[in-house]
Image (cartoon, helix red, strand yellow):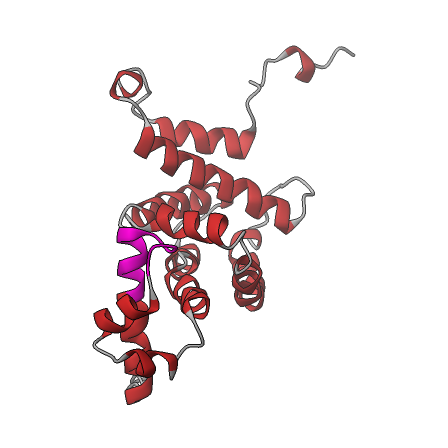
Amino acid sequence: MTNVPLTKGEQTRARILESAYGLFLRQGYAATSMREIAEASGLALGGLYAHFKGKADIWGDVFMAKHPYHEILPVFLEAQGETFEEVIRDSVSRILRELGKRDDLYNLMFIELVEFEGQHIPAVAQELLPMMPKLGARLFGMNARLRAVSPVSFARALGGLILIYHLSERLMPPVVRKIVSHNGLDEMVDIFLYGMMADDAPSRRNHG
């Protein structure tokens, strides 16, 4: 199926969003003016206001357009594996590779959380809701023996694993990296899948 070409107005809005996002990343949201966005977009200031009411409206569209769910959801659906464990390991690895391409990711989230107190995040959740049944079928339709946890708790736990690993990899000091296991990601996925306690822990023994 061929893509429908963008109208001239849609092309202009897309150019505005890209120009604004570049400015937001370089100099911050608060320090960026509508006039600067107009100039970067090749528009007169009045032309910019013909498309957006103000800077906050521009940011709302930027946040939705640049949120990483656009990359993450297809990765979940394309993850390979015959078992639940294999699918989780493959999806986590794929997602981390995709996030590794996004140097802008933390600036995006910082602006949203600090400047807007996360007010656009519910809109992202609304975008995700229609996709949840398909994701659930992919992840939970494999007859795996799983804990009775809610899908929301599962998503929070898996998202936490991915975020913490990605962030800690970026921020880890060299002296710490020298002592980190070469298979650190596998170990963290093991903890996510099976917990921290070994099978021979006293609390798991059958005392009869």
Pick whichever, 190 or 164, lies toward us: 164
Q: Image check: 201 left or right of 107?
A: right
Q: Position of residue 59 (x, y in %)?
A: 42, 64
138 in relation to 36, above or below: above
Q: In which quarter of the image is residue 185?
A: top left
Residue depicted at x 36% and y 48%: 107
56 in relation to 151, above or below: below
Q: Does the magenta stretch include residue 186?
A: no
Q: Image check: 91 left or right of 24?
A: right
Pick whichever, 29 or 155, lies toward us: 29
Pick whichever, 208 or 29, lies toward us: 29
Q: Specify start and end residues of the magenta stretch as a single range.
A: 20-32
Image quadrant where one finds the N terminus: bottom left
Residue depicted at x 48% and y 48%: 114
Residue depicted at x 30% and y 46%: 97
Q: Does the magenta stretch include residue 31?
A: yes
Q: Position of residue 85 (x, y in %)?
A: 48, 41
Q: Position of residue 52 (x, y in %)?
A: 41, 77
15 in relation to 31, above or below: below
Residue depicted at x 57% and y 69%: 130
Q: Quadrant of residue 92?
A: top left
Q: Position of residue 177 (x, y in %)?
A: 28, 21
79 in relation to 57, above or below: above
- Please name the predominant secondary structure of the magenta segment in the image: helix
Q: Image check: 140 left or right of 62?
A: right
Pick whichever, 11 or 70, lies toward us: 11
Image quadrant where one finds the C terminus: top right
